[in-house]
Amino acid sequence: MYPPSTHLLFGTEPDQYTFVWPGQAVFGAGSAERLSAWMQHSGSRKPLVVSDAGLVAAGLVEPHLARLRDAGLVPCLFDGVEANPTLDNVAQALDLWHSQACDGVVALGGGSVIDVCKVLLARLCSDAPVEQVLREGDALLCRPIPPFAAIPTTAGTGSESTTAALVKDAQGRKHVLRSRACRPQWVALDPLLTLSVPPAVTACTGFDTVMHALGAATNRATNPVGEALALQAMVLSFHALPLVIAQPDALQARSDMLLASYLAGVAMSLRGTDGIHGLCTPLESLVDVPHAHVLAVVCVPLMRFTLPAATSPYARVARACGLSAKSADDAACAAELVEAIDHLRRAARLPCTLAELGVKADRLEAVIGIALGSPSVALNARKPTRDDLVSLYQAMQPA
């Protein structure tokens, strides 16, 4: 019924690629107010609204619930999503779906909320065990996806447009669902909802966007459309992130970050990421910190390792971002990009060492084994050996 999961499509053969766009997206201040009309049009009358307790306490959820009620719908709220979402969060949402006989899903929140909704829909539309659904994605979906709308309240993960969803199991291991079918069918990209995001969250989610765009723009995958989107996302986010950190109410910069997040999500879904994510994901099984904290520790050592094999794509990104004169040679431009990313992570006040994450050296052996088998590591412009990975993780230790 559904095409194979997209992780099979991140190929490196020239002139062999696919291009599948996610669902409809509406962009602009106030666009989230169109939610009720879309839910009515989709046929949903009792949507499950998934969010988190912080957004509810901040008063961001109730106006949307009120508009749904005013339109004659009967929304049911699940606000139990954690910052690093779990399979237990999915199970709780699934229980509420069944007990209240819901018929549609609204994700109102950041990437964690949207990821929980993706896995929830996969559970609803498959009869296989959840572990198997997480591994095989769309191939196991045997029922149509219910109406699914998303309103992201942060500009960062791009989950509203990616094919991936990350959740932790009871043992803390991270699992990735890859599914085209479980992407939102309708998305409202409303920058007004991001104005009240706390500075630390703005910095974290914004750095996510930069890393997503960078990885999709510079890895070994072949997809020119994905590369173009990644470059545009990189330019937007690289310039807008310092502005939203310094001026949280800068609406144009907030808008640029939200668009960059969406475009980077599409780009990742077409091209995958790079070794930064490949080294990051196994570390996240050891710590309970924001995704950007781990990305920030990994990115610079991995970029310096990759630089000899990625001089051309790094230079292309540097020139697009205006970091170097167009007449500068590729090596100088590429080196400038690495230093600019290092400066950006420090400006965002993100950690730079494993010690800051609470990761001890004696726990890295298992991480290295997992990273070796990562599809993202395989897509890196320079593929590391086991010895390289040991050296890379050592480079993330305090000087």
Image (cartoon, rainbow, N blue to C red):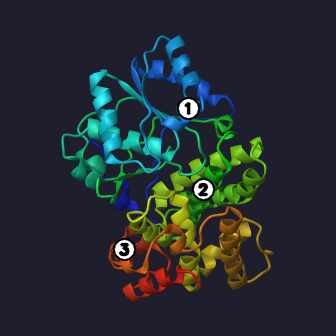
Q: In which quarter of the image is the N terminus?
A: top left
Of the residues shown, which amino acid type is indicated by label 1? Ala
Q: Could you tell me if residue 216 is visible in this image?
A: no
In the displayed structure, 266 sits above or below 189; it is below
Q: Of callouts 1 and 3, which one flags the residue occurring earlier in the amino acid sequence? A: 1
Visible in this render: residue 177? yes
Disc 1 + disc 2, Cβ < 8 Å: no
Q: Identify residue for label 2.
A: 204
Give the distance between the C-alpha atoms of the residues marked 2 and 3, in whole angstroms.
Answer: 23 Å
Q: Of the residues under marks 2 and 3, which one precedes in the sequence? A: 2
Location of residue 293 with respect to 112 vertically, above or below: below
Residue at point 63%, 29% (across, down): 31
Q: In this view, does 314 lie to the left or right of 68?
A: right
Question: Residue 77: x percent and y percent?
Answer: 43, 26
Of 243 and 95, nearer the camera is 95
Label 1 and label 2: CA atoms lie apart by: 21 Å
